[in-house]
Amino acid sequence: MRFVFVFLLPFFILSACQSKEETSKNVEMYNASGDMVGTAQLLDGPDGVQVKLKLEGLTPGFHGLHVHEYAKCEGPDFKSAGNHLDPEGKEHGLMHPKGPHLGDMPNIEADAGGLVDVELMLPGATLKEGKMSLLRGEGTSLIVSENQDDGISQPSGDSGTRIICGEIKSGKGNEATESPTDPTEFNEKQE
Ligand SMILES: [Zn+2]
């Protein structure tokens, strides 16, 4: 019996390593017409999630950027993504004394050519499991708005229409339709 345990131990350790939680996520960003206009690279770190955002085709100037509560970017209005991600019941705005929402971020600035290339932080957020996770449930989404966020007006800083959306998908909740069952594994479980 002991021999069997020692023999199997390395396999348990190996499988534990393979099921390690995600530490990065690539997100494709789409405009209201459904055209891909950029990418966001999310990287989990000790202080939060770093967001590397690259976009094109924007009106030059400042735009709001927020993480919203559902991984559903249905154009043209992207209302399907819900409100700003707010797991702690706070008020909106980086300048609000009772804020901010977890999903509130600084405004981004598009240059004269309509390009954005920035690195931002979402302090306190994570890609791992938990209350502050961007991958809770089926995930969340990253949305750019037409106007800049004033940092204090409720509920979303008077930032106007949602113009670009990217789904931060966890891969959970839709496994049945996306990944067919491995028949070998199924048979093994039956025995
Ligand atoms: Zn907010």
Image (cartoon, rainbow, N blue to C red):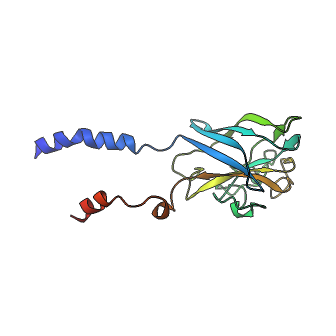
| Residue 164 horizontal/vertical position (percent) | 76, 51
Q: Quadrant of residue 69?
A: bottom right
Residue at 83% x, 57% y: name it. Answer: 154
187 left or right of 32?
Answer: left
Is residue 38 among what the camera can see? yes
In depth, the one of 28 and 25 nearer the eye is: 28
| Residue 160 horizontal/vertical position (percent) | 86, 55
Residue at 17% x, 40% y: name it. Answer: 7
Locate the C terminus and report the quarter of the image it occupies: bottom left
Q: Quadrant of residue 112?
A: top right
| Residue 157 horizontal/vertical position (percent) | 84, 52
Q: How many marks?
A: 0
Whether 10 is drawn above or below 84: the answer is: above
15 left or right of 96?
Answer: left
Residue at 69% x, 60% y: name it. Answer: 81
Whether 47 is drawn above or below 161: the answer is: above
107 left or right of 139?
Answer: right
In depth, the one of 4 and 155 nearer the eye is: 4
| Residue 3 horizontal/vertical position (percent) | 11, 41
Is residue 100 among what the camera can see? no
In depth, the one of 34 and 52 nearer the eye is: 34
Q: Quadrant of residue 156?
A: bottom right
Residue at 76% x, 55% y: name it. Answer: 91
